[in-house]
Image (spheres, helix red, strand yellow):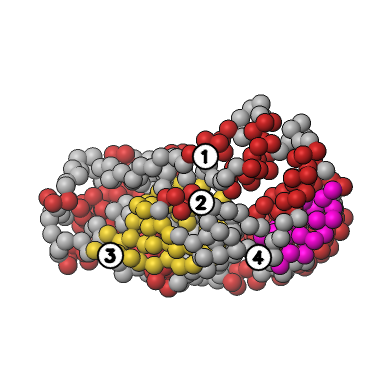
């Protein structure tokens, strides 16, 4: 079968023919074949011969994605409608100025007094020994001492982030001053704070605190502690890493397996590694892949032959979500992402782009309706890059158990667009990232499946740890038939 990618004309919405039930059924078959990477499916031949130009376009695009995982010829297809354009907020100029080389000490020293929390936290993180002085250290000590009994914050203000970031910088600039607050923050009831305590302990080479945090019930804390301990204690802490292999969180298991690289305790690694790898395979979560790979690497290093990280219990195929065909034909769905009151409140609206990623948008819509994203956090916030979150583990290694296929397109990853988090080709984990600036280099590797159409100021104001109270459908209009 030959697929002609050129020659398709993008028709105005008013000129598109009405969709029939037969068209919808054919598109459902096309999308199923695309999702299963079935290049032999008869649906592609039928779709390319359809009298309906939209069906032909969907068929051509699906065929091209199946035959080329990088979808290099995407620009041969009609360009999708552009995402909304947004200006940068004023504070981002101040944020960027902080990192210019050479560092401007006057800007860094003034940063903690800025009226935007992103600028404040950036200035704290970038504070250098050459720019530090007695006034700076006094302010950091004051911030570290600020109460952090709750993660609640008002919009436009930070909460636990201030003492947590200040602790790490103080540990770097004034180790003696930071030891007392470290002992307090390492016992904080807020897991995010304990993660930063682990980072501060690493700065201080404090193996006692790191060992204690490596046994933390929160696996993100455990991961940070194991990473830090591996740097400052090496294989003298192998007992700790071996215990961490029994964590539930994939991120902690992976960190422990990486920390054990080169250990002389091969027999212990074999016993623990085989047990853990069997458990991970039985879990049958595809997003445990990085943990499985790390454990398998340690088993091979210990002398176990023919170890495969990929032998999962056969997962059931994911059926095509019911609304995928309608989304491909142009059904308009708008989701509202509402932040918890404890995270400053507010909401932003996202229009799903089923015209470019119908399979992804349909699965996301199913998850939204099931409440999957409710009460989950934005765990990664890079104010001049992206925010990312929405997964069950509040980290990049634990996502929805069944991978999403890539649906690469010509829709660029620009400011305000929403992309699917992955850890490699066809490893979408249902977690979202929102572009805070134009990130065109991401277009080549990540699926764009939505765009912010209202509330970009709320997106810009999100801080690490902010919680999604709920995501819900606020409008939905069917395509013309």
In the rendering, at what x and y percent does residue 86 appear?
38, 42
Kindly indicate whether the residue at mark 4 contacts the one at mark 1 (C-beta within 8 angstroms). Answer: no
Which residue is identified by label 2? 461
Labels 1 and 2: the sequence-earlier one: 1
Q: Measure the alpha-carbon separation of dots 1 and 2.
A: 11 Å
Labels 1 and 4: the sequence-earlier one: 1
In the rendering, at what x and y percent does residue 406 appear?
42, 53
- Element on which disc 4 rests: loop
Q: Measure the alpha-carbon separation of dots 4 and 2.
A: 19 Å
Q: Residue at x 82, y 50 (%)?
A: 178
Q: Residues within 10 Å of mark 2 (few under 14, many from 20)?
A: some
Q: Residue at x 29, y 53 (%)?
A: 355
Using the image, tell me which numbered label, if any, was put on residue 92: 1
Q: Measure the alpha-carbon separation of dots 2 and 3.
A: 27 Å
Q: On the rendered structure, is 124 left or right of 22?
A: right
Count all numbered tags in the image, as a single digit: 4
Which residue is identified by label 3? 476
Q: How would you classify the magenta stretch by its main secondary structure?
A: helix
Kindly indicate whether the residue at mark 2 contacts the one at mark 4 (C-beta within 8 angstroms). Answer: no
Labels 3 and 1: the sequence-earlier one: 1
Q: Nearer the viewer, residue 441 or 177?
A: 177
Labels 4 and 3: the sequence-earlier one: 4
Which residue is identified by label 4? 150
Q: Measure the alpha-carbon separation of dots 4 and 3.
A: 37 Å
Q: Residues within 10 Å of mark 4 (few under 14, many from 20)?
A: few
The image shows residue 109, relative to residue 372, as above or below, that is: above
Q: Residues within 10 Å of mark 1 (few under 14, many from 20)?
A: some
Labels 2 and 3: the sequence-earlier one: 2
State which region is magenta.
Answer: 177-203
Labels 4 and 2: the sequence-earlier one: 4
Using the image, tell me which numbered label, if any, was put on residue 358: none
């Amino acid at each position: 079968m030959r697929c002609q990618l050129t020659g398709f004309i993008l028709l105005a919405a008013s000129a598109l023919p009405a969709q029939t039930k037969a068209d919808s059924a054919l598109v459902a078959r096309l999308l199923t074949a695309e999702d299963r990477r079935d290049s032999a499916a008869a649906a592609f031949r039928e779709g390319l011969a359809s009298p309906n130009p939209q069906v032909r376009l969907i068929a051509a695009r699906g065929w091209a994605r199946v035959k080329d995982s990088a979808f290099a010829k995407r620009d041969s297809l009609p360009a999708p409608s552009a995402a909304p354009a947004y200006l940068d907020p004023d504070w981002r100029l101040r944020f960027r100025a902080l990192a210019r080389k050479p560092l401007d000490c006057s800007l860094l020293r003034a940063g903690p007094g800025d009226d935007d929390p992103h600028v404040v936290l950036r200035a704290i993180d970038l504070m250098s020994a050459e720019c530090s002085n007695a006034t700076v250290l006094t302010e950091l000590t004051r911030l570290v001492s600020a109460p952090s009994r709750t993660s609640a914050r008002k919009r436009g203000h930070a909460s636990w982030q201030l003492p947590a970031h200040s602790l790490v910088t103080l540990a770097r600039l004034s180790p003696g001053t930071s030891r007392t607050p470290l002992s307090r923050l390492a016992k904080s009831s807020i897991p995010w704070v304990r993660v930063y305590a682990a980072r501060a302990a690493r700065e201080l080479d404090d193996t006692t605190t790191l060992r204690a945090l490596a046994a933390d019930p929160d696996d993100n804390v455990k991961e940070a502690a194991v990473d830090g301990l591996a740097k400052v204690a090496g294989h003298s802490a192998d007992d700790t890493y071996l215990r961490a292999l029994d964590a539930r969180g994939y991120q902690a298991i992976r960190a422990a397996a990486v920390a054990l690289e080169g250990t002389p305790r091969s027999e212990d690694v074999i016993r623990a590694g085989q047990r853990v790898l069997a458990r991970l395979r039985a879990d049958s979560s595809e997003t445990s892949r990085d943990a499985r790979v790390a454990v398998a690497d340690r088993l091979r290093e210990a002398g176990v032959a023919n170890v495969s990280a990929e032998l999962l219990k056969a997962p059931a195929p994911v059926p095509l979500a019911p609304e995928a065909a309608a989304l491909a034909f142009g059904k308009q769905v708008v989701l509202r992402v509402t932040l918890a009151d404890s995270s400053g409140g507010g909401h932003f609206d996202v229009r799903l782009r089923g015209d470019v990623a119908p399979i992804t948008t349909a699965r996301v819509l199913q998850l939204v309706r099931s409440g999957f994203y409710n009460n989950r956090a934005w765990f990664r916030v890079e104010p001049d890059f992206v925010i990312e979150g929405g997964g069950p583990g509040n980290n990049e290694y634990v996502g929805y158990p069944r991978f999403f296929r890539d649906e690469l397109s010509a829709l660029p990853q620009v400011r305000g667009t929403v992309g699917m988090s992955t850890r490699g080709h066809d490893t979408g984990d249902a977690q979202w990232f929102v572009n805070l600036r134009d990130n065109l280099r991401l277009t080549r590797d990540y699926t764009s499946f939505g765009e912010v159409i209202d509330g970009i100021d709320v997106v810009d104001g999100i801080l690490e740890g902010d919680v999604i109270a709920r995501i819900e459908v606020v409008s939905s209009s069917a395509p013309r038939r």
